[in-house]
Image: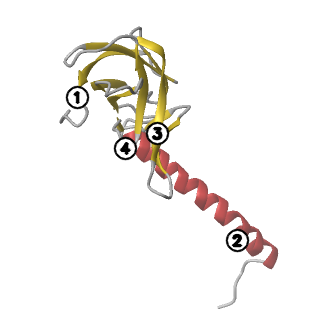
Amino acid sequence: MKNSLPPWLRTSLAAVAAPVFACALGLVGLGAWTTHGYAGSPPRVAVEGGYVFLKFGATPETAAFFTITNTGGSADRLLSVSSPRTAVPPELSRHRTTDSRAAYRQPAASATIPAGKGLTMDPHGVNVTVRPDTDWREGEGIPFTLRFERGEPVTVLATVVRPGRNTT
């Protein structure tokens, strides 16, 4: 059977088919996203599990850690952390290792809090470097305020613990 469409029309239809298919696929994906309640859903951030290591020896700095959850439909970013109980402003940082396996901290401008997930800070990843204003005592609660790109600031108490102590 001979094709009844003129060649110019077959070429035009072939050129239009790919973009139409891509749009249809995108609409199906957006429909699924909306069906699950995520379309336009803002981040919903909560902070818990705050702890800060007791200073060790003559080292002036220590680290604080928080568990941040985001039950919203879009990601947020932790931009800064502050505390009235530190000698200098706390700083977001990441644990890094050199090729010779020496550890060091690298300042971080922000930390991503993924949608539907979160971020659990630990000594081997993202944490907050702090310089206590006085000698903190084990068990003491230190206030910290975490500021996010889209969400409201959250103030929590971080409990002072000895390094190496199980904090979970």
Amino acid type for the residue under numbered disc 4:
His
Disc 1: which residue: 162
Q: Give the residue at mark 3.
A: 94
Is the C terminus in the top left, top right, bottom left or bottom right quadrant? Answer: top left
Residue type, label 1 = Arg
* Residue where numbered disc 2 is placed: 14
Q: Residue at x 20, y 33 (%)?
A: 167
CA gap, disc 4 and disc 2: 53 Å
The outermost residue toward the bottom is 1
Q: Earlier in the sequence, mark 4 or mark 2?
A: 2
Q: Nearer the viewer, mark 4 or mark 2?
A: 4
In 3D space, how far apart are the residues under numbered discs 2 and 3 (Cα atoms)? 51 Å
Answer with the quarter of the image where residue 128 lies: top left
Single out the residue that lies furthest toward the top.
84
**Nearer-N-terminus badge (3/4):** 3
Question: Does 127 sit left or right of 106 as displayed?
Answer: left
Name the foreground residue: 68 vs 163. Answer: 163
| Residue kind at label 2, given as amino acid type | Ala
- Which of the two marks, 1 or 4, is nearer to us in this view? 1
**Numbered badge on residue 124:** 4
Residue type for callout 3: Arg
